[in-house]
Image (spheres, rainbow, N blue to C red):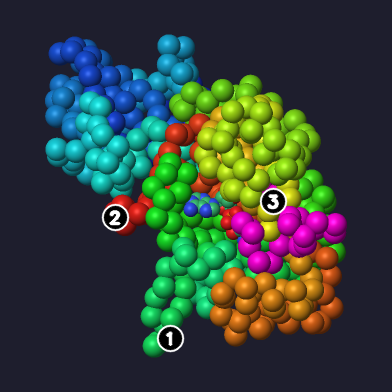
Amino acid sequence: MSQEIPTIQIIDAKKYVGQTVKIGAWLRQKRGSGKIAFLQLRDGTAFFQGVVAKADVPESVFDVVKSLKQETSLYVVGEIHEDERSSFGYEIAISDVEIIGESHDYPITPKEHGTEFLFDERHLYLRHLKPFATLKIRNTLIAATYEFFNERGFTKLDSPLLTGSAPEGTTELFETDYFGEPAFLSQTGQLYAEAGAMAFGKVFTFGPTFRAEKSKTRRHLTEFWMVEPEMAFMHQEESLEIQEAYIAFLIAKVLERNEQELDILERDKDLLRSYTELPYPRVSYDDAIKLLQDNGFDVAWGVDFGSPEETFLANHFAKPVFIVNFPKAIKAFYMKRHATRDDVVISADLLAPEGYGEIIGGSERDTDYDYLKERIAAEGLNQDEYEWYLDLRKYGSVPHSGFGLGLERMVTFVTGEEHIREAIPFPRMTNRLRP
Ligand code: 4AD
């Protein structure tokens, strides 16, 4: 193959119309007749079609093309053309092909496959259209998260994954042996983020978190990624403003950078755009209960919301909605007491519309040493493990607030995917540890 031919990526095809280029790609599918072959190609940047006309290439090249199997890797050489019939807009008229890696009996054929099968083959399924689009959007959300918090003066603080504490409750812990003593896989980086906020003012942690959730739902993973900002000298209302600005920023960045992927997933872009309009409604837990009761839900004050309740509430407002000030009894020990009521705490959950559920949970943190010590004991937590955390209330304690965004919940919301397993490269669920 000639030296002067530029090697390009499919995504850049539009810059090379009328030129001969070389592309390293994989063959997704092939169809055609004895005279012409259509090769569906992908290279990790985009998907497009290669056309090989028998009359235009040496017979040896057409013979190679005829022999190609699904997922063979190859170099193709050819001229880029506009192609108005395809959604991508361009194709390559292939003049030469070089096989790089053979492929035989690729298991994911163009026919319909069951979900369990596809996730057993997840290491290969990643190559296909839907996972490609979903995980590209995940990547944008990750990049945009760093942009958002860096632009606002936050410091990224890494929290440990092996811990001795169980801030979100002791029922969902993965325990492991740490040189003879028990350790837990982190449920949240929050307590460490609070220490960080007292050192750096505004911080965020971002990493994997683990919950031994027995619940088999389309919204629960046992390993998921959480973004946890924590801000010193900040009350809850200002934290809510950051939360909604963050969500709107993430959606705007995906609309800006992932048009191709949103089209692959057939996500309604106008609807997504409507979620960038702020503010989001703030509804008290009390009012939410009333609203649910008035609409036929059998719920009493004090219960946590299930999926039908969350779906109803967010759909009712047709945008993400904050439910604020939950009952103390169903929330974590660190949440700040309400100024005038003993039964609720200064907390907020952000519920996404269209049935995507809770995407953010957060609160103002209580600052009182004795109260927190009492709450830790009342929750049955091991007090020794929280001594360092209580130190934060002894040495220059300040009002502070924070929240946690579940990355995979956000991915499902933005992409419109039905199930959270699609939102992470290799999902971990009660029934899945492999591949
Ligand atoms: O509401 P959660 O449990 O809050 C915390 O962990 C706090 N420490 C956060 C903080 O204030 N710093 O979880 C926060 C978010 C949820 O809103 C949800 O999006 C996600 O994490 N999440 C899960 N995502 C997938 N699978 C699970 N099992 C999840 N559990 C929570």
Question: Marks 1 and 3, how far apart in space?
Answer: 35 Å
Magenta extent: 329-349
Is any part of residue 212 visible from this angle? yes
Q: Secondary structure at mark 3?
A: loop
Q: Using the image, determine if residue 151 lies above or below residue 373.
A: above
Q: Which residue is denoted by mark 1 in the rendering?
A: 181
Please report contact status of discs 3 and 2: CB closer than 8 Å, yes or no.
Answer: no
Q: Is residue 88 magenta?
A: no
Q: Which mark is residue 434?
A: 2
Q: Which residue is denoted by mark 3 in the rendering?
A: 326
Q: Taking 230 as reference, is 269 left or right? A: left
Q: What kind of residue is marked 3?
A: Phe
Q: Using the image, determine if residue 337 lies above or below residue 32.
A: below
Q: Using the image, determine if residue 280 lies above or below residue 342.
A: above
Looking at the image, is mark 1 or mark 3 nearer the viewer?
A: 3
The first of marks 2 and 1 along the sequence is 1
Q: What residue is drawn where x is 18% and y is 31%?
A: 68
